[in-house]
Image: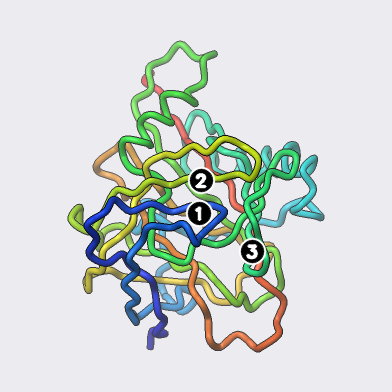
């Protein structure tokens, strides 16, 4: 039987939704909490796939000892994630569209620690970028050393929990095939880094739809990686996977706070 958890959707709003990476008290969001069934994906006979639901869990043992070490993230981990995504997708090239993000559930503020961000989990259903943002970002990040024309690009989030299981605030992902265009609401995602000028881009928040099919991977460990899509320019492929952090009431009180590392990457395929 699926588990049942409370997930925060977006409710009816007269204002344009807006959320802040650092100061959540400034968010302009009307949340619509819903108790929904969330399947423990570990119990499935057929594993989830990037080419079907838009997400997958892979075994991956990183050579990084400390995921808060900026040097290790910039060199070892970056190369590991690039090689892994190239192999999984068959893409011709993979680039990273943002700095790595370390997230913690207790006391996290948005800071830039050398070459990575520290931040808090997003506990509302969202997609990191809108379609228009995805197109703009892919053009901006497109490698300049290639002469071939891009025939396809796709944005991926590569998420790993490096705190011991269970996680107090794990991540749930939604089968992209169960999402309708009417469920998607544009929102301004604001990067309010203390001491720096604010900037924003367009993300998506999600309305409740009983058709949504949710999954989570219980008790993730540091040798596992959850990969899910944020956008794919190929309309025949899975696209735009909603996701959210959520409170797991079965996690023992006083357990170590969830800590995770995520990388956002763009894969490119070229015409031959």
Q: In this view, does 165 lie above or below 224?
A: below
Callout 2 crowding tier (Cα within 10 Å): few <14, some 14–19, many ≥20: few
Tell me how far mark 1 sits from mark 3, CA to CA. Answer: 12 Å
Q: Quick one: 161 or 127, which is closer to the camera?
A: 127
Residue at 69% over, 43% down: 112
Q: Is residue 179 above or below residue 269?
A: below
Q: Seen from this angle, which residue lies furthest left?
A: 182
Q: Mark 1 points at which residue?
A: 227
110 to the left or right of 154: right
- Secondary structure category for the residue under label 1: strand
151 to the left or right of 56: left
271 to the left or right of 254: left
Callout 3 crowding tier (Cα within 10 Å): few <14, some 14–19, many ≥20: many
Residue at 42% over, 85% down: 3
Task: Tell which tag, 1 or 3, sits nearer the viewer.
Answer: 3
Tell me how far mark 2 sits from mark 3, CA to CA. Answer: 20 Å
Q: Residue 161 carries which label?
A: 3
- Secondary structure category for the residue under label 2: helix
- Percent across and percent down for residue 149 are 38, 17
- Percent across and percent down for residue 134 are 38, 36
Q: Residue 88 carries which label?
A: 2
| Labels 1 and 3: the sequence-earlier one | 3
Tell me how far mark 1 sits from mark 2, CA to CA. Answer: 10 Å
- Secondary structure category for the residue under label 3: strand
């Amino acid at each position: 039987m699926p588990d049942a958890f409370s997930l925060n959707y977006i409710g009816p709003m007269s204002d344009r939704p807006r959320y802040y990476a650092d100061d959540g008290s400034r968010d302009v969001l009307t949340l619509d909490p819903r108790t929904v069934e969330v399947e423990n994906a570990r119990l499935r006979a057929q594993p989830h796939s990037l080419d079907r639901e838009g997400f997958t869990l892979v075994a991956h043992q990183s050579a990084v000892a400390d995921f808060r070490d900026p040097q290790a993230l910039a060199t070892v981990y970056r190369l590991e994630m690039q090689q892994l995504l190239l192999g999984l997708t068959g893409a011709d090239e993979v680039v990273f569209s943002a700095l790595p993000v370390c997230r913690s559930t207790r006391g996290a503020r948005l800071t830039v620690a050398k070459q990575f961000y520290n931040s808090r989990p997003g506990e509302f259903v969202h997609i990191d970028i809108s379609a228009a943002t995805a197109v703009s970002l892919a053009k901006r990040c497109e490698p300049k050393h290639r002469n071939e024309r891009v025939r396809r690009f796709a944005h991926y989030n590569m998420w790993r929990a490096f705190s011991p299981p269970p996680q107090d605030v794990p991540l749930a992902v939604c089968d992209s095939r169960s999402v309708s265009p009417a469920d998607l609401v544009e929102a301004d995602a604001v990067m309010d880094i203390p001491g720096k000028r604010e900037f924003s881009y367009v993300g998506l928040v999600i309305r409740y739809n009983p058709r949504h099919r949710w999954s989570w991977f219980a008790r993730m460990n540091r040798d596992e990686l959850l990969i899910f899509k944020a956008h794919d320019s190929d309309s025949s492929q899975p696209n735009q996977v909603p996701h959210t952090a959520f409170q797991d009431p079965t996690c023992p009180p006083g357990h170590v706070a969830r800590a995770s590392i995520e990388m956002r990457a763009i894969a490119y395929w070229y015409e031959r």
